[in-house]
Amino acid sequence: MPLLLSPHHQLLLLFLLLAAASHGVASGATYDSSMCLSEPFTCGAVSFSYPFYRSSDRKDVDGNENSYCGYPGMGIVCDNDKPMLQLDGVGNYAVKSIDGTRANVSIADPEAVGSCPRVDHNVTFGPGTWLEFPNTTVDYLVFFLSCYFGAGLVKPATLDPITCSEFVSGVPGASFVFPNESVPAAGNWSQACRQVILVPVFKYGPVDPSNSTWRNTGYGDVLRQGFQVSWDNRPVSCTQCEESNGRCAYKQTGEFHGCLCTNGQIGARSCTTYNSTGQKKDRIKIYTIAGISSIMLCLLLFAFWLGYKKYGRKKKSKETARIESFLQKNGTIHPKRYTYAQVKRMTSSFAEKLGQGGFGAVYRGSFSDGRQIAVKMLKDYKTDGEDFINEVASISRTSHVNIVTLIGFCLEGSKRALIYDYMPNGSLERYAFKDNSQGGNTLGWEKLFDIAVGIARGLEYLHRGCNTRIVHFDIKPHNILLDQDFCPKISDFGLAKLCLNKESAISIGGARGTIGYIAPEVYSKQFGVVSSKSDVYSYGMMVLEMVGARDKNISANCESSSQYFPQWIYEHLDEYCVSASEINGEITETVRKMIVVGLWCIQLSATDRPTMTRVVEMLEGSTSVLELPPKVLFS
C-alpha cells in the first residue's frame, strides 16, 4: 500500500517546494571576509566556531561595529584564556564545554565558588537572544532570601534555613534553598522573604532539603556544576540561509543583516551560485526544477488517493463485515440497533461530554421518554472490531445488578457507539481516589465496604454465574460505575475474554489491562497461566487502593509514602485499622476485613489467590476467622 499523507502534510510539502522556487537570491553585495571567521577560534581549552563569534568581531561592510556573523547573544569574551558568554541582563557566565551535535553549551556562574556560594539574580533570556533551556538536562534550585517572620507570618517547624557561615554572613535574615519540586506550598511563609530567586542547574538525583548536609554544602555542589543552554531556536530566515550553506549575519539591533555566502557575497535570504551569465539563468534553473517537482508531487498525491480508495476502504469494509457477521450469528442476543442519526438526536449532537478514555468519549443523552443514557463513541478502530465485539458479546450475555446494562448500539460505516444506562454518580475513581483534604467527593467506610462487596458479587457472576464465563481483564476504579444509590456496576468490557465454563487457563494474544492492576501472569508466563484469577488480582489491588485513598492521613505519613503500600499495610495492619476507624470497633473490623481480603487477592501465584466466590464469603463472614497471607508475597 502506498504511503498516505494527511492533507496538512501534503500542503506543507507543496509549500516547501514552491518556496524553494521563489526564495530571494543574493543581492550582489560583498562583505569583508573578516566579518565571519572561516576557522574556529580557541579560548582556553574550549574551541568556538559559528554560530559563536568573538565579541570584538562586529564589523559590517564599512567597518562599523554594528553587524556580526553568528547568532544574537552568542558573542564570546575571552578574558585571560577564560571564555565568557554574556547573558542578556544577567552577566558573564564561564563556558565549560560545547556540544555542537545537540546545540548545547554548558556554562556556570563564575561567582558560584566556595563551599556555599551566594546567589543574587535570576537567569532569564530576553527577546534579543535565541538561547533557551533544554528541558532534558535542566533542573532548578529555588532560593528564598532575607526572610523575617512575625506579624502573622510564621515559619513552618519543618523548614530550616541555610546554615553555612559564608552564605549567612552575606545575606541578612534567614535564607532557604529547595529543589524546585520540593518547594513547600503550605501557608504564606514565603511572603516573609525579601527575594525569591530561581537558578538553573544540571539535573541531579533526589535530595532531602531538610538534611543538614544539603543546607550547609550540598546545594553548593549542585550550583557549581552549572547548567546547559541550547541555541537551536532559529527563525525561518536563518534556517533558509544555513540550508544554502550560508551563515547568518545580524545587526546589533537584532535585525537580520543578510546571508553570508562562501563566495564573498551577501544574500537577502540565502546563497545562490553566481556564474558568468548572471542571475537570470540561475532563476530559470530554479523555477524549472520547482515546476518539475510540483508536477511529480501532484502525481504522487494522486497515487496516494488511489491507494487509499483501494486499500483503506477495503480494510474498513472487511472489518465492518466481520462485525455484521457476528451480529447476524447472534441475532437473538445483542440489544437494539440504532442509526447514527438517532444517536446524534439522543445526545443533542454530542453536546455534553461525560468523560474521555483510550477507547473514545462518553456523552450524556436521553430517549424520547426522558430516560437518561450514556453513549460511548468508540475511536477510529485499529483492530478488526475486537473491542466492539467483546463489549456487545460480553454484556449481552449478562444480567446482574452489579453489571452495567447495554441498552443498544450503533454500527454505521466508521461510526460505532454503545448505549448504556446513565450512572448519575459517575465512576468509583471520582469518589474514592481524589484528594480528600478539600472535602466534597468522599465516601464513608460503610459505603466503601458495600461497594467492594457489590463488585465482588459482580465478578463472581462473570466468572461463574452467566451462561458463558467472562474474564474482564480491566478491573479498576475508572471502570466501576455508581448509580443513584451508589450501587456499583462493572463496565467497559472491551478487553474481556469469553470462555467455556470448563476452561481454566485462557489464551490471550498479549498483555492487556491497566498498569498497576495487571496480574503478574498476564504480562509474564513465568508467573503461571492466565485465568479468572487474573481478575482477582486486579480486584485486590483496587480494594487496597480504596483503603489507602479513603484515609487522608496516609499521604502525610512519610514512612508509608516512601514504601510499597501493600508492604506497609501488612506490617502496620492493627495500628492502621484503629487510626482509620477513629477508635470505632465496628469500623475497625470492616477496614481490617477489606485489607486482609485485598492482600489475599494480590498473591503473586494465582493458585494462592481465592476465587471470587471465596472472596464474597470472606467479606460477608466474620473477621475473626480471617488470617493474613504469608509475608513472602512481598519479597
Image (tube, rainbow, N blue to C red):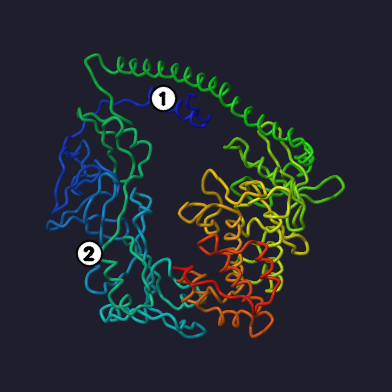
Give residue 236's quadrant in the image.
top left
Is 118 above or below relative to 295? below
Contact check, label 2 and label 1, Cβ < 8 Å: no
Determine which of the numbered discs, if any, sits on residue 17 in the image.
1
* Image position of 66 with respect to 521: above or below: above
User: Where residue 274 sits: x, y (%)?
Assistant: 24, 21
Who's the residue at 61% across and 68% down the image? 546
Q: Quadrant of residue 237?
A: top left
The extreme front residue here reads 502
Marks 2 and 1, the one that precedes in the sequence: 1
Mark 1: secondary structure: helix
**Spatial distance from mark 2 to mark 1, Cα to Cα?**
48 Å
Instruction: Provide the secondary structure element on which disc 2 rests.
Output: loop
Q: Residue 487: percent from the left, percent from the top?
A: 75, 62
Task: Please name the amino acid that badge 2 sits on.
Answer: Pro
Label 2, on which residue? 110
Label 1: few (<14), some (14–19) or many (≥20) C-alpha neighbours in 10 Å: some
> Label 1 is placed on what type of residue?
Leu
- Foreground: disc 2 or disc 1: 1
